[in-house]
Image: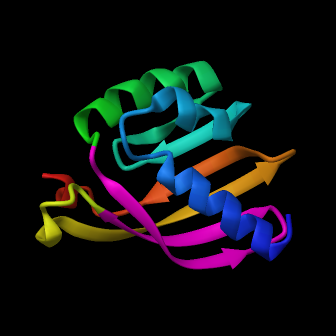
Amino acid sequence: MKDQNLKEFCGKWLKSWSGNRPDHLIEFYSDNIFYLDPAKPQGIHGKDALFRYFKKLLAIYPNWKWSLVELFPNEKGFVLKWEAQLSAESESKKFYGVDIVEIHNQKITRNEVYFDPKNLS
């Protein structure tokens, strides 16, 4: 993907994390996805398992907002520095993290998410 296309893809993908729409979010991922975050350090394999996780996760945080801080394209996809806000009312609940994202055929095949989980409490 070209840099501009990556930025557009990333903008749409980050937006899909808000609003408790796991059915929309999961469409960005391939069937053979590997996903990892601080709550799932062993990782999740496969789209069905990830969809179940997203349904629970997005229900807990339906109003969080994600925004791109910096994008670093690479041969497999990109590394993303992001900012998240738990809710529009909670300016003090902003935190930052990094995603490693690999893409094949316009679908995310690997998504590793790194941030300090104490920010979610």
- Please indicate whether residue 58 sits to the left or right of residue 5 in the image: left
Direction from residue 113 to residue 58 in the image, left or right: left
Compared with 51, 73 (above or below) is below
The residue depicted at 13 percent of the width and 60 percent of the height is 89
How far across and how far down the image is residue 39, in percent?
A: 34, 42
Q: Is residue 29 found left or right of 51 in the rendered image?
A: right
> Does 37 appear in magenta?
no
Q: Quadrant of residue 10?
A: bottom right
Magenta residue span: 63-84
Up-down relation of residue 55 to residue 69 (above or below): above
Q: Residue at x 73, y 66 (%)?
A: 6
| Residue 92, horizontal then vertical, whole percent | 12, 71
On-image quarter of the N terminus: bottom right
- Determine which quarter of the picture holds residue 102: bottom right
| Majority SS type along the magenta span | strand
Residue drawn at 28 percent across, 40 percent down:
62
In front of the other: 11 or 84: 11
> Does 83 appear in magenta?
yes
How many discs appear? 0
Residue 50 at x, y percent in the picture: 53, 28
Residue 70 x %, y % = 55, 80
Give the residue drawn at x 59%, y 54%.
12
